Image (cartoon, grey):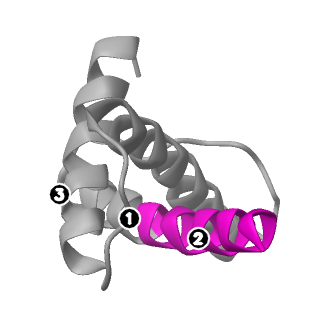
């Protein structure tokens, strides 16, 4: 998948995940895009692991199932980021 498709998928998945996730996450469009891209990799890797049993770094594709996987991965990334930043601020 080329970088433009990753950016589009990242913005789309990050925006949907931020809209679904409760509370205020902060950050701008760049943070949303980065969390979405990380989510695409998390979602794609977890799906590949569940299908094949092998842990490989793969990204979700720019399709409806790929967007759903990327959103689920972005929700996980937002949750982990919240744990990390909450711990660092205490």
Residue sitting at x 68%, y 75%: 83
Residue sitting at x 53%, y 55%: 44
- In the picture, the disc for residue 25 is 1
Q: Quadrant of the C terminus?
A: bottom right
Q: Are marks 1 and 2 in contact (CB under 8 Å)?
A: yes
Where 20 falls versus 36 (above or below)? below
The single residue placed furthest to the bottom in the displayed view is: 22
- In the rendered structure, the answer to whether residue 48 lies left or right of residue 66 reads right
Q: Are marks 3 and 2 in contact (CB under 8 Å)?
A: no
- In the rendered structure, the answer to whether residue 74 lies left or right of residue 49 reads left
Label 1 environment density (alpha carbons within 10 Å; few <14, some 14–19, many ≥20)? some
- In the picture, the disc for residue 82 is 2
Where 85 falls versus 87 (above or below)? above
Q: Quadrant of residue 50?
A: bottom right
Mark 3 or 2 closer to N-term? 3
Q: Nearer the viewer, residue 5 or 19?
A: 19
C-alpha span from label 1 to label 2: 8 Å
C-alpha span from label 3 to label 2: 27 Å
Magenta stretch mostly in which secondary structure?
Answer: helix
SS at mark 1 in the image: loop
Mark 1 or 2 closer to N-term? 1
Q: Which residue is mark 3?
A: 64
The residue range painted magenta reads 73-90
Mark 3 vs mark 1: give the one in front.
Answer: 1
Q: Position of residue 9 (x, y in %)?
A: 27, 38
């Amino acid at each position: 998948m080329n970088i433009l498709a990753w950016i589009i998928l990242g913005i789309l998945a990050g925006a949907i995940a931020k809209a679904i996730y409760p509370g205020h996450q902060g950050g701008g469009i760049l943070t949303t895009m980065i969390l979405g891209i990380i989510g695409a990799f998390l979602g794609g890797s977890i799906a590949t692991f569940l299908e094949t049993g092998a842990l490989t770094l793969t990204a979700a594709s720019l399709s409806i199932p790929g967007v759903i996987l990327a959103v689920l991965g972005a929700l996980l990334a937002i949750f982990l980021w919240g744990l990390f930043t909450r711990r660092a601020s205490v």
